Image (cartoon, grey):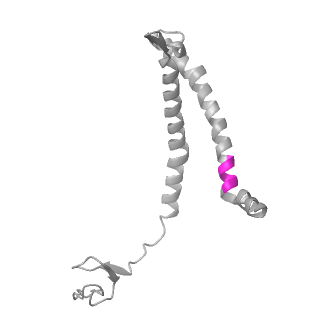
Amino acid sequence: MWSDFKKFILRGNTVDLAVAFIIGAAFNGVIQSLVKDMLTPLIAAIGGNPNFSALSFTLNHSRFLYGNFINSVLSFLIMGGVVFFLVVQPINKLITLSQRNKTPIEPTDKKCNECLSTIPLEAARCAFCGVKQPLKTA
């Protein structure tokens, strides 16, 4: 059991996932600080309220801190934007560039005209329903 556990822990994808999680958590702290300490005061200064994170309202003696909620939404949007523009877009571009010179794979099968089963491209009749298939013309 111990050796199986060591194999599991030392597999590449487990270690990669752990590293990604740690870096993501650290990056989250940076983004939270950016929103709380830089963007929120900037937005609050434009809006006229010097302490944006302290915005709240009271309902039936319960205090709702919607300023903190706005901070969280801004953090989420910034994190999503950073991941999209700095990770997803470049990777999609690299995938597109890497597949640019590849020749398309020729199909080896086709759909039967009658029952829509998948049959070999050279088949004269469908193996499932027996309907004669049009011949492939070159």
Q: Main secondary structure of the magenta part?
A: helix
In this rendering, the answer to whether 85 lies above or below 50 is: below
Residue at 62% across / 25% down in the picture? 33
Q: Residue 15, image x and y in percent?
A: 70, 53
Q: Which residue occupies the foreground of this view, 109 or 130?
A: 130
Q: How many marks?
A: 0
Q: Which residues are magenta?
A: 14-19
Q: Residue 93, image x and y in percent?
A: 50, 53
Which quarter of the picture shows residue 9? bottom right
Quadrant position of the C terminus in the picture: bottom left
In this rendering, the answer to whether 134 lies above or below 40 is: below
Judge whether residue 106 is colored magenta: no
4 left or right of 72?
right
Q: Residue 112, image x and y in percent?
A: 26, 80
In this rendering, the answer to whether 27 lies above or below 117 is: above
Q: Which residue occupies the foreground of this view, 28 or 47?
A: 28
Which quarter of the picture shows residue 30? top right
Instruction: Specify the farthest residue to the right.
Output: 2
In this rendering, the answer to whether 16 lies above or below 75 is: below
Q: Residue 35, image x and y in percent?
A: 56, 25
Residue at 27% across / 76% down in the picture? 116
Residue at 54% across / 16% down in the picture? 53
Which quarter of the picture shows residue 36? top right
Q: Which residue occupies the foreground of this view, 85 or 34?
A: 34
Quadrant position of the N terminus in the picture: bottom right
